[in-house]
Image (spheres, rainbow, N blue to C red):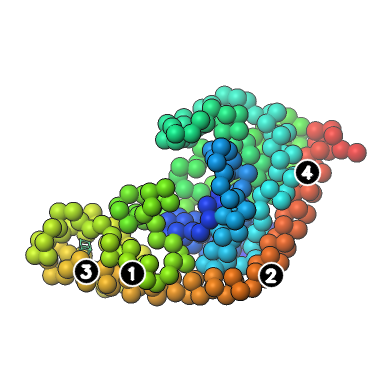
Amino acid sequence: MNQQKRILSGMRPTGRLHLGNLHGALENWISLQSQYDCFFFVADWHAFTSDYAAPGDIRRNSWEMVLDWLAAGLDPKQSTLFVQSELKQHAELYLLLGMITPLAWLERNPTYKEQQLQLQAKDLSTYGFLGYPVLQAADIIIYRANGVPVGKDQLPHIELTREIARRFNHLYECEVFPVPDALLTEVPVLPGTDGRKMSKSYGNCIFITEPEEDIRRKVLQMMTDPARKRRTDPGDPEVCPVFAYHKLYSSQEEVAEAAHGCRTAGIGCVDCKGILIRNLLKRLGPIRERRLQLERNVEEVRAGLKDGIERARKESSATMERVLEAVGLSG
Ligand code: SF4
């Protein structure tokens, strides 16, 4: 294991995870944990930046998410798993970084304006929403992480984190913070059952620990190529969400057969979906089983989290000692 390199990443507590979460982040985390010293956390304070008016049951959602993390293969013995709000050191560093971060850096962040437009139903003209990349920076550098796995859309945030780390080191003439690198991760885009982006708010998700009969029903109701109205019409697999799933869950031969069968009307959508259902159940079955086991052994999950919180506390406290010394607040 590349123990000297530390990776950090977090997820907002959204409750049970869906296949978009699995392929968009979790699978990558699982593969990283055998290569790096990984810190993965439940970003529960972040949930308030956009959902402060109706945060929902954050504790419950955090717990459900952690169970799914472990069911899918995160290992608390290999990775440090923790809940952000248990580590008040994040808030202390966030406060200090807020003092040194120029407002213009936050206002020019492209996701700030984009998200305000996308989430117009919420009033996001808040100090917390503008400043959440500073909290993100604190989350990362408090563990002196060397790398952060991100998709392209998150690159501006990592750049901001790098600028904040450099500014702190420069202002206080120290080397407290390594400047973290973005580990750019290409993730497959998996559409929801209606062809739009998979999202709980659209009600188009397949959950990673969903019961078999629900998976069967959802796949059978999935949207297909809308131009393929009759069984005898040839279709275009590249516009069909079912085919996007085949690419992830079926063998190369099955993918080739589905593509050919679709284009020549040699296979019907029900049969094509049947192959997908079989493969999806095979892949998700062990995750569902593991989740049931974990639900019967919640003490094991609590112990794993407790260990992670202790490890995170040790690391974040050590950094804060150096930070306070650098700014002249120690002793
Ligand atoms: Fe989609 Fe398969 Fe039907 Fe083609 S045959 S439209 S890939 S479900």
Residue type, label 4? Met
Where disc 4 sits, the SS reads helix
To which residue does mark 2 refer?
299
Circles 4 and 1, Cβ within 8 Å, touching? The answer is: no
Near-viewer residue (266 or 268): 268
Number of residues whose C-alpha sits closer than 10 Å to that of mark 3, classed few (under 14), some (14–19) or many (20 or more): few
Q: Which mark is residue 145?
A: none
Where disc 2 sits, the SS reads helix
Where disc 1 sits, the SS reads helix
Q: Which mark is residue 320?
A: 4
Circles 1 and 2, Cβ within 8 Å, touching? The answer is: no
Residue type, label 3? Val
Task: Give the quadrant of residue 312.
Answer: bottom right
To which residue does mark 3 refer?
270
Q: Is residue 125 above or below residue 253?
A: above
Spatial CA distance of label 4 from label 1 is 51 Å
Residue type, label 1? Arg
Q: Is residue 321 above or below residue 102?
A: below
Number of residues whose C-alpha sits closer than 10 Å to that of mark 2, classed few (under 14), some (14–19) or many (20 or more): few
Q: Is residue 19 above or below residue 272?
A: above
Spatial CA distance of label 4 from label 3 is 58 Å
To which residue does mark 1 refer?
216
Spatial CA distance of label 3 from label 2 is 43 Å
Does label 3 or label 2 sit earlier along the sequence?
Answer: 3
* In front: label 4 or label 3: 3
Ligand 1: image quarter: bottom left
Residue 240 image point, x, y percent: 24, 57
Identified at 51% across, 75% down, the residue is 289
Number of residues whose C-alpha sits closer than 10 Å to that of mark 4, classed few (under 14), some (14–19) or many (20 or more): some
Residue 99 image point, x, y percent: 70, 28
